[in-house]
Amino acid sequence: MSPLLITLALLAFLVLTVVGAGVQLVQQYQRGVVLRFGRLLPTVREPGLRIIVPFVDRMTKVPVQTVVMDVPSQGAITRDNVTLAVDAVVYFRVSDPAKAVVNVDNYLGAVSQVAQTSLRSVIGRVDLDTMLSDREQVNDELRAVIDTPTEAWGVSVDRVEIKDIALPEGMRRSMSRQAEAERDRRARVIAAEGEAQASARLADAAREMGETPGALQLRLLQTVADVASDKNSTLVMPFPIEMLRFFDNASGTTAEDADADRASTPPEVNGSGPAPAITTGPEADRR
C-alpha cells in the first residue's frame, strides 16, 4: 500500500470522527443543554439533528416526559398521635432543562428525597380523620410542599397521590367497632321512624273508620274473606257491629236510670239521710 493511500485513509478517518463528534441527534422527548468549555450556552437545543463544536461543546440530553415516581412507605405520627405508614406517587416533569442540569446534581434523586421528607411533614400536621376522609386536601398540600424546592431545579410537580394508608391493628379494630355501632344506630333510628309513621297511618285509618260507620264492617268482611281463602279448618263467625253498639247504648241507658232512681228516692228511705240524734239525761226521761 502506498503512503498516499495511507494518508488519505487517515484523513478520512479523522473527518468522520470530527463529523461524528459534531453532530448530535436530539429525540422528540428530549432537550439538549450545551456547555462550551464548561460554560452554559443560553440556547437549548430542540429535537432534531443538531451540530455542535467537536471536542469543545458537551451536550447533555434531558428528557421532558412526565416521570412517575413511587415514594416508599413512610412512618409518621399524625397530629392526634396515631402512628401511620403511608406511601404515595409523584408525577413531575422537567420544565427548565438548563436548571435541571446546572442547579442540581441528580434531579431524580433530589425529588425523591424531598417527596419523602415532605410526606412525613404533611402527615404530622393533619389528624387521622382528615387523612382518611379528605385525601384531596392532603394531596394538594403535599404537592405544594414538594413543588416549592423543586422549582429552583427546573422541575414542575403536576400531582401527588397517596396510595395506601396502613393503620395499626388496634386502630383497625376500634374503627370496625365504631362503624358497627354507627350502623346499629342508623338501623334503630330507621326502625323508630317506621314505627312512628305506621302509628300515624293507623291513627288516621281509625279516625276515618270512626267517621264512616260502614267502613269498619267492610273491613271486617274483608278480613273474614282473607281468613276463609286459606285452606284451614277454622270457622270465623263475625259478630255484628250493630249488636256491639246496641249493648253499649243499653248499658249506658241502664246506668243513667239507676242514677236517676237514686236521686229521686228520699234520704230516709234509701238510708243515705242524716242519722237520728241520741238524747240522754232528764230530757230523755220525760220522753
Image (tube, rainbow, N blue to C red):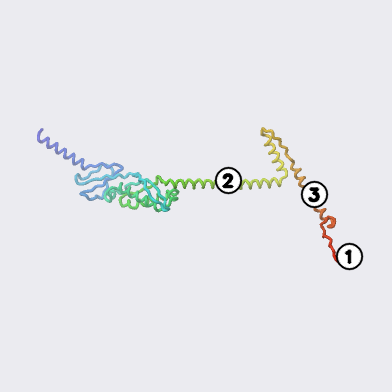
Image coordinates for residue 122, horizontal then vertical, percent: 38, 52
Name the residue beneath numbered marker 3. 254
Residue appearing at x 46%, y 46% in the figure: 173
Indicate the amino acid at tag 1. Asp
Name the residue beneath numbered marker 1. 285
Marks 2, 1: nearer the viewer: 1
Indicate the amino acid at tag 2. Ala
Judge from the rendering whether residue 221 lies leftward or rightward of residue 128; answer left or right.
right
Judge from the rendering whether residue 84 lies leftward or rightward of residue 102; answer left or right.
right
Name the residue beneath numbered marker 2. 191
Q: Nearer the viewer, residue 9 or 133?
A: 133
Q: CA distance from mark 2 to mark 1?
A: 85 Å
Judge from the rendering whether residue 240 lies leftward or rightward of residue 188; answer left or right.
right
Image coordinates for residue 159, horizontal then vertical, percent: 38, 47
Could you say whether the residue bearing mark 1 is in a helix, strand or loop?
helix
Q: Nearer the viewer, residue 108 or 26?
A: 108
Residue appearing at x 23%, y 48% in the figure: 35
Indicate the amino acid at tag 3. Thr
Mark 2 and mark 1 residues within 8 Å of each other at the beta carbon: no
Q: CA distance from mark 3 to mark 1?
A: 50 Å
